[in-house]
Amino acid sequence: MTHSCACRNDERRVVMFAGKGGVGKTTCAAATALHHASSGVRTLIVSTDPTPSLSHIFEVGRSPRGNKPPQSLRVEEIGVDRVKQMWDEKFGREVYGVFSSFVDIGYEEFVEFVTEVLPGMRDEFMVDYIRELSLKNEYEKVVWDTAPLGQTLGLLNMPSMLGKHLKTAPRIYSRLKL
């Protein structure tokens, strides 16, 4: 009898675990990622929970006490600092160049504003990051351990909200007397 992972032929590259806090999202996500990776599937498990625990589960950065996770498994926790770093690498200098031409602001202050203060930008960037991961061939499976449901629904709704804002914003902003 041979065992093969049905996930290799599965078109779904992103597996998302969502639900209320405390229902076992992280446990199920970790088990799913471990299953895929143990079957030889290049797997990334990524957490967008503001209080992630994947590094504890997989003993990342510590000497493992039990079995080591498979080589085909990568663990990533996306906190505020990581989002800031990723946004800065992808857009920082270019967007700052435009923004600083009409607003006197230092670079670090600008990056902090965009990634921490500007409503929804962190969430929008995380959704885009997950989307990009699903399109790359670096991983066959992306297992997404989400934040508790209320935060996740806000995160998933962000592209729509941002689109609506951008449709009406020019008319509103043009009326402002700065």
Image (cartoon, grey):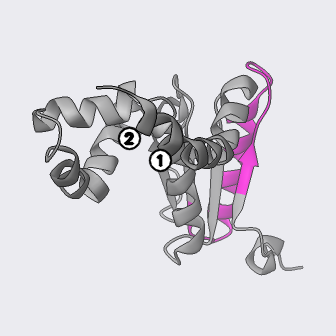
Task: Classify mark 2: helix, strand or loop.
Answer: helix
Residue range (magenta): 15-43
Across and down, in percent, residue 10 comes to 80, 75
Q: Earlier in the sequence, mark 2 or mark 1?
A: 2
Magenta-span inclusion, residue 41 = yes
Q: Secondary structure at mark 1?
A: helix
Q: Is residue 3 above or below residue 126?
A: below
Of residues 136 and 159, the one drawn nearer to the viewer in this rendering:
159
- The picture places residue 86, in percent across and down from the top left corner, at 33, 49
Pointer 1: what residue? 125
- Nearer to us of marks 2 and 1 is 1
Q: Which mark is residue 83?
A: 2
Amino acid at circle 1: Phe
Res 94 → quadrant: bottom left
The image quadrant where one finds the N terminus is bottom right
Q: Are marks 2 and 1 in contact (CB under 8 Å)?
A: yes
Q: Left or right? Give the position of 135 relative to 107.
A: right
